Image (spheres, grey):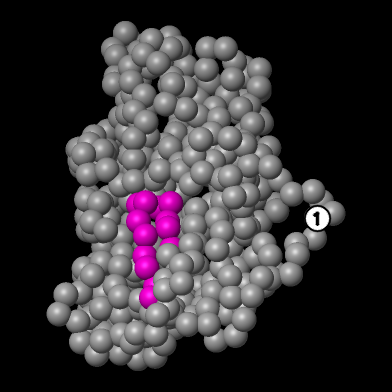
Amino acid sequence: MTRRMILASSAAVAALAVSAGAQRVQPPVHVDGWGRPVAEKPKDYTPGPAPKRDLSGIYEPAAGWRAGVQATGARDFPSDRAHTLPFTPLGEKTWRSHRPGFGVTAVEIQYNNDPFNICDPIGTPRISLFNLRGLQIVQTPKQVLLLYQNSQVWRNIWTDGRELPKEFDEPRWYGYSVGKWTDDYTFVATTRGLDERTWIDNAGRPHSDQLTVEETFHRVNADIVELTLTIDDPKMYTQKWTALNKFRLGLLPDSFDIREQLCSPSEAANYNTTQADAVKK
Amino acid sequence: MKKIVVVAGLLTMAVPVLAHHGNASVENKTVVMKGIVTEWLWTNPHTFLKFDVKDESGTVKHWTAEWNNPSTLVNFGFTARTFKAGDEVTVTLSGVAKSGAPIGRLKSVLLPDGTLMTEDEAVGK
């Protein structure tokens, strides 16, 4: 949002409050899962140096806790008139069969066939490309574990030297991942064996069983990790494309409790009944 | 009860982006009305406020309006107990169903004690 829009929005809310007779507008306060306010860093705060070969910590998007929503698709390749993906014919056809709520192919809610509507697992890489909020990274001697606020799921990235199989008998919603340090501050994870039913992002970009997701986690300093995520799927795209480019994740205090954010099938069904079905009238 | 006030064209820059369902079913316009809360659903993927609005002829319409998910709203002071059945509130919608159904998207709600509950778009961007 531009500064002008922010000011206009704030002014509009204030005007509304006055016109409605409000005594006060409830102030926004960022809180953790226990409802505890998250302290802001002092203005003169300078982050320390990046620790070597260490990503562990609890993070949120550094630009703000909602900066990872990416409603119109992958942040660095959104579904709009300015971005055209290098689809293969199959990729284009598959994309057109997906009917998302956002982007250039957005449809009204009653026609939306987003698998997440019924709480199908959000999958990799959409877990990073839609509603990326709290993320805890845990390192063990043989794995890097990614614990996500959205859907309260985890991914394990093996660092024990194993290689990904050439074929997968059982595709998984979150795939099979291996990773390695390419230098003291850069960790690269590769994921394959992904279930084709998931969408790449909120704009319904498709993928096949040939998808390779590469995630580069670069620790800039003690407080910031930059995440770059690329999509390589020769069945759907004629070339690799970058969905996230140095997306900054900011370290939170280690007392930060990641809030539960689950897709509940019964609550989603209620939503579809009371809201989605009602607009058909 | 005052009649519904429609302020089309105002505040459209602040229409919230709601999860993955999109905005294509919604006409962006501001609608302000007074009503009585019947239910507050603190659910995923969206919260709902249900309320009754009586028009000048005395006819009561049952409205359902959605807001963002709890994970977002908690950062604006909302809780599962922010509204309770029987509360007299002033509701401002940022959009209503194109179909004409009494379905909307919430912009703000003025509580009986004068507190305006809103999701300030300027925060977290």
Question: As displayed, is residue A208 above or below residue B57?
Answer: below
Question: As displayed, is residue A177 above or below residue B63?
Answer: below
- Tell me where residue B81 sits by quadrant: top left
Q: Is residue A98 magenta?
A: no
Secondary structure found at label 1: loop
Residue under the point 50% across and 73% down: A244
> What residue did someone put label 1 on?
A45
Residue under the point 66% across and 70% down: A51
Left or right: residue A4 versus residue B55 is right
Left or right: residue A3 versus residue B57 is right
How many other residues sit within 10 Å of disc 1, few (<14), some (14-19) or many (≥20)?
few
Which quadrant holds the C terminus of chain A?
Answer: top left
Which quadrant holds the N terminus of chain A?
Answer: bottom right
Is residue B53 visible from the viewing direction of this image?
no
Residue A56, horizontal then vertical, whole percent: 55, 63
Magenta stretch, residue numbers: A146-158
Camera-side residue of B87 and A182: A182
Left or right: residue A189 versus residue A47 is left
Question: As displayed, is residue B113 above or below residue B123?
Answer: above
Is residue B86 visible from the viewing direction of this image?
yes
Camera-side residue of B29 and A82: A82
Q: Amino acid at mark 1?
A: Tyr
Residue A252, horizontal then vertical, whole percent: 61, 52
